Amino acid sequence: MTLDKKYFNEVRQELLGYAAKRQEVIKESSQAQFLSKKAIFAMQRDDAGEAQQLLSQAEKIIVDLNIKHKKEPGIFEEGSYKAALEEFVEASLFNRYLQKKTIGKLPKIKIDTDIFVGGLCDVPGELLRYAIKSATEKKFEEVKRCRAAADEIIGELVDMNLTGYNRQKFDQAKQALHKLEQVLYEVSLRQ
């Protein structure tokens, strides 16, 4: 038996090349996810400047990955990349809420609808945390605004007939809305 050494070398090189690209995507995605989480933390502290800077850094990483690996779309099926995108969506949408902008499509990055919905489902949880902070600061109108935004998000999600992973996230979003309603009720009793 004879092996085609040249062909086996080509296969080896392709696999090793993909593995190196995969490791890069995992590493860069992890950094983008970390920056998005830090941006959310900054938003919760009302540090809009830091939040915007962190979001911009995360966005740049994601955009650069998309440009660099556009000829290998399969690489974007990596779980770390999807998790980074979902966290970025959550941070971006929460940032839009805080800036009183329309929550919707993100302009610079093409986002798969499942990933967008996953990130959107996490926003009511951030609204809950922000409402609690606002309530302790006696910013009762902001608590009402948080509840109204969460209610509107849930209203859109309920019509999507979600299943699987996003159904679980939707259930968590509904729980956050319920807790927001409790916060608003307790605030109304103290006014």
Image (cartoon, helix red, strand yellow):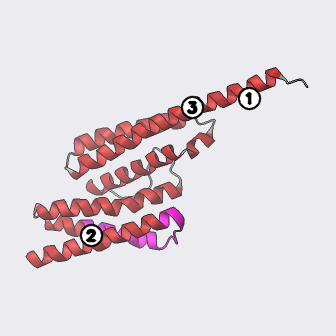
Q: Name the residue under label 2.
A: 147
Q: Is 152 colored magenta in this rendering?
A: yes
Give the residue type that dot 1 points to.
Val
The residue mark sitting in front, 2 or 1, is: 1
- Considering the numbered disc 1 on the image, is that residue within a helix, a strand or a loop? helix
Tell me the magenta residue range: 146-167
- Considering the numbered disc 3 on the image, is that residue within a helix, a strand or a loop? helix
Q: Estimate the spatial distance between the alpha carbons at disc 1 and disc 3, rounded to whole Å.
A: 15 Å
Q: Estimate the spatial distance between the alpha carbons at disc 2 and disc 3, rounded to whole Å.
A: 43 Å
The percent position of residue 29, horizontal first and vertical second, equals 46, 39
**Relative height, residue 68 to residue 87 (above, below):** above
Name the quadrant containing residue 136.
Answer: bottom left
The percent position of residue 30, horizontal first and vertical second, equals 43, 39
Q: Name the residue under label 3.
A: 21
- Considering the numbered disc 2 on the image, is that residue within a helix, a strand or a loop? helix
Q: Which of marks 2 and 1 is nearer the N terminus?
A: 1
Give the residue type that dot 3 points to.
Lys
The residue mark sitting in front, 2 or 3, is: 3
Q: Nearer the viewer, residue 92 or 21?
A: 21
Q: Which of marks 2 and 3 is nearer the N terminus?
A: 3
The quarter in which the N terminus is drawn is top right
Q: How crowded is mark 3: few (under 14 residues within 10 Å), some or many (20 or more)?
A: some
Residue at position x 35%, y 50% in the image: 91
The percent position of residue 156, horizontal first and vertical second, equals 43, 70
The percent position of residue 135, horizontal first and vertical second, equals 15, 65
Q: Residues within 10 Å of mark 2 (few under 14, many from 20)?
A: many
Residue at position x 55%, y 44% in the image: 78
Q: Name the residue under label 1.
A: 11
Which label sits on residue 176?
none
Give the residue type that dot 2 points to.
Arg
Residue at position x 49%, y 37% in the image: 26
Q: Which of 105 and 32 is in front in this view?
A: 32
